[in-house]
Amino acid sequence: MKPLLFIARNAPQDSLFEILENRYEAEIIRFDLAWELFLRKAGRNKAGQLDLPPGNPRTQWFSLHLWVRQTLGGLTDALVQKQRPVIGIIRSCSPAALEYVIRMMSIYFGGVGVLDAAENAEDPVLEEVERFLQGETVDRIQERWIAPVVNVTDAGTPLLERTSKTKGGGAFTWLTGVLGSDRLFSQVYRLAPHASGNRLHHHSDVDEMYVVLEGTGILRTNHGNASLKPGDIVVKPAGSGLATQFIAGDNGMTILDIESWNGPDQTDVVGYLDHREVFLRGRGLNHVVPLDSCLPGDDMMAHYNDAYVREKSGQMRFGEEA
């Protein structure tokens, strides 16, 4: 059975959804309430519509994404297709927000009907929903299923435009909003001629691979440099200490960056070698320290049971001085 996405122009009436839930034994997904809970003011645009904050979904609205993934996954049985009717509820929203919700529902279900409900139209809505749930074709309910495909060379969809940003001589498009995953992250770099898409850096806990889609350039690493052309794949295992940076050639370069994470809030230590700094990020961590301040762990363990205080210089103050 196809799920239904119900777009309410005004604040939805709870009585309507109680009827839908009780009469049709439907599973009701309140996307509208989740938007308010997880995004608050950041989840609305100037027109008052529900919207997605611009930029990287992993840092801007991943709490909402996790809820959507867990909620839809909890209503899906990958082996048994029979299930209760599913009705998603969302208020008036931007094209990007609507595309995101439809894409996520399309991953879990074999079709998505969308009903854009008029104001104060409860009785006709109930009739149309009932006919739809019985398998009838309803003029006002459009089939909006989206295949799990996105072409990074095409003009951006509303969602991809929302998750794009221009900075540092390049245009970046984050693909998290279409992947439907909480461990796989990806983005596309479109670098201007001779521009660099990122710093020379390495990760402690994020595996990365890069695919050169268009153009040529240079791969700069802390071990040496290499020329790049379309079709090349660059590997960077977590914890290897291999640092990379891309520098586009005369005609620019387009790169697909694919990252594997244990989770969106995992701890990761990023080393920026040119800048001589270390970024500590993760749950309860958001700090930058000078690379030259990093001391071997053995230095601490050798004095683990001693009384001392570590000074800013890195020196240890022992005994009574501590």
Image (cartoon, grey):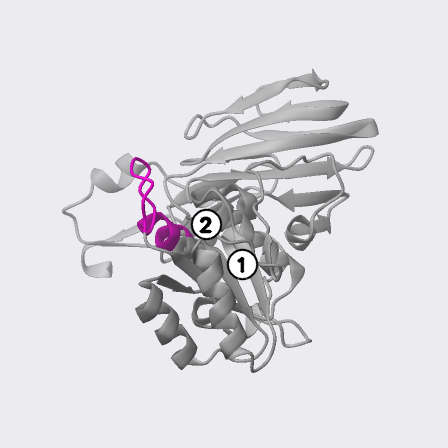
The disc labelled 1 sits on which kind of residue?
Gln
Mark on residue 2?
2
Task: Give the labeled residue for mark 1.
Answer: 60
Q: Quadrant of the C terminus?
A: bottom left
- In the picture shown, does residue 82 fall above or below 162? above
Which residue is pictured at 76% across the width and 42% down the height?
155
The image position of residue 192, as x and y in percent, is 80, 37
Which residue is pictured at 55% across the width and 44% down the height?
178
The image position of residue 86, as x and y in percent, is 40, 57
Q: Nearer the viewer, residue 50 or 102?
A: 102
The image position of residue 49, as x and y in percent, is 62, 72
Return the residue found at the far left: 305
Which residue is pictured at 24% across the width and 60% down the height?
321
- In the picture shown, does residue 35 fall above or below 185? below
The disc labelled 2 sits on which kind of residue?
Lys
- Mark 2–mark 1 CB contact (< 8 Å): no
Which residue is pictured at 18% across the width and 55% down the height?
319
Q: Residues within 10 Å of mark 2 (few under 14, many from 20)?
A: many
- Please tell me whether residue 72 belongs to the stretch shown in magenta: yes
- In the picture shown, does residue 25 fall above or below 192? below
The image position of residue 167, as x and y in percent, is 72, 49
Magenta span: predominant SS is loop
Q: Rounded to the nearest whole Å, what is the CA distance between mark 2 and mark 1? A: 31 Å
- Horizontal side of 179 relative to 246 (left or right) equals left
- Please tell me whether residue 204 belongs to the stretch shown in magenta: no
Q: Which residues are magenta?
A: 69-83
Examine the rendering and report whether any part of residue 181 can be seen. no
Q: Nearer the viewer, residue 266 or 72?
A: 72
- Say which label, 2 or 1, has the lower sequence index: 2
Examine the rendering and report whether any part of residue 9 can be seen. yes
